[in-house]
Image (spheres, helix red, strand yellow):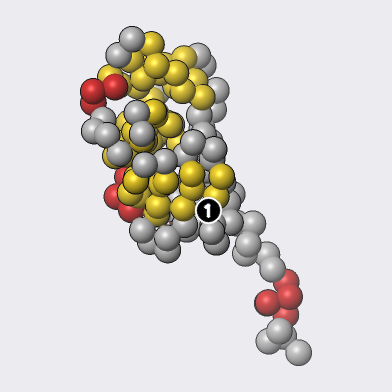
């Protein structure tokens, strides 16, 4: 794939999140502090849809389900947040928000389910 126009900068209110379909791939555009980010639609913690659970305050995105937070300017997880956000490359050309989509970015939600120490506690 290549750069794709997703929307106009005026389609997204300041400090808000809006979901778009880009050739069958759901991409969440976040408007913050006069900048934009493109991320997968689900929270990397427990798959909560960030379009409804996410709030943006300045550069800080918070998932209100369990309060994981990220600094969008640096993409650093804050406080107890354990995973960074995945991000698509994004550029603004004129009024157009464009995203580079090679493939769908997805979190690995299964990686914590194979903890044998926890499972074997009851097996004796
Ligand atoms: S699902 Fe988002 S913080 Fe838990």
Q: Quadrant of residue 123?
A: bottom right
Q: Position of residue 11 (x, y in %)?
A: 23, 26
Q: Which of the pair 13/45 is nearer the observer?
A: 13
Q: Is residue 50 left or right of residue 2?
A: left
Q: Position of residue 67 (x, y in %)?
A: 42, 60
Q: Residue at x 72, y 80 (%)?
A: 120
Q: Which of the pair 46/70 is nearer the observer?
A: 70
Q: Residue at x 40, y 52 (%)?
A: 62
Q: Quadrant of residue 9?
A: top left
Q: Is residue 115 above or below residue 52?
A: below
Q: Position of residue 24 (x, y in %)?
A: 39, 28
Q: Which of the pair 22/50 is nearer the observer?
A: 50
Res 41 seen here: no
Q: Is residue 39 above or below residue 10?
A: below
Q: Is residue 92 left or right of residue 16?
A: right
Q: Position of residue 114 (x, y in %)?
A: 68, 64
Quadrant in which the C terminus appears: bottom right
Q: Residue furthest top?
A: 94
Q: Residue at x 46, y 53 (%)?
A: 69
Q: Which of the pair 20/53 is nearer the observer?
A: 53
Q: Residue furthest right?
A: 124
Q: Is residue 74 left or right of residue 64?
A: right
Res 70 seen here: yes
Q: Quadrant of residue 6?
A: top left
Q: Which residue is mark 1?
A: 78
């Amino acid at each position: 794939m290549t750069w794709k126009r997703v929307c106009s900068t005026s389609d997204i209110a300041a400090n808000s999140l809006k979901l778009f379909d880009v050739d069958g791939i759901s991409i969440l555009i976040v408007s913050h502090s006069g900048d934009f980010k493109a991320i997968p639609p689900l929270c990397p913690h427990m798959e909560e849809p960030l379009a409804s659970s996410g709030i943006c305050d300045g550069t800080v995105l918070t998932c209100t389900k369990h309060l994981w937070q990220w600094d969008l300017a640096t993409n650093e997880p804050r406080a107890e947040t354990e995973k960074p956000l995945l991000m698509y490359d994004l550029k603004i050309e004129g009024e157009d928000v464009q995203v580079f989509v090679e493939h769908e970015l997805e979190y690995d939600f299964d990686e914590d389910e194979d903890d044998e120490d926890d499972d074997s506690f009851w097996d004796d």
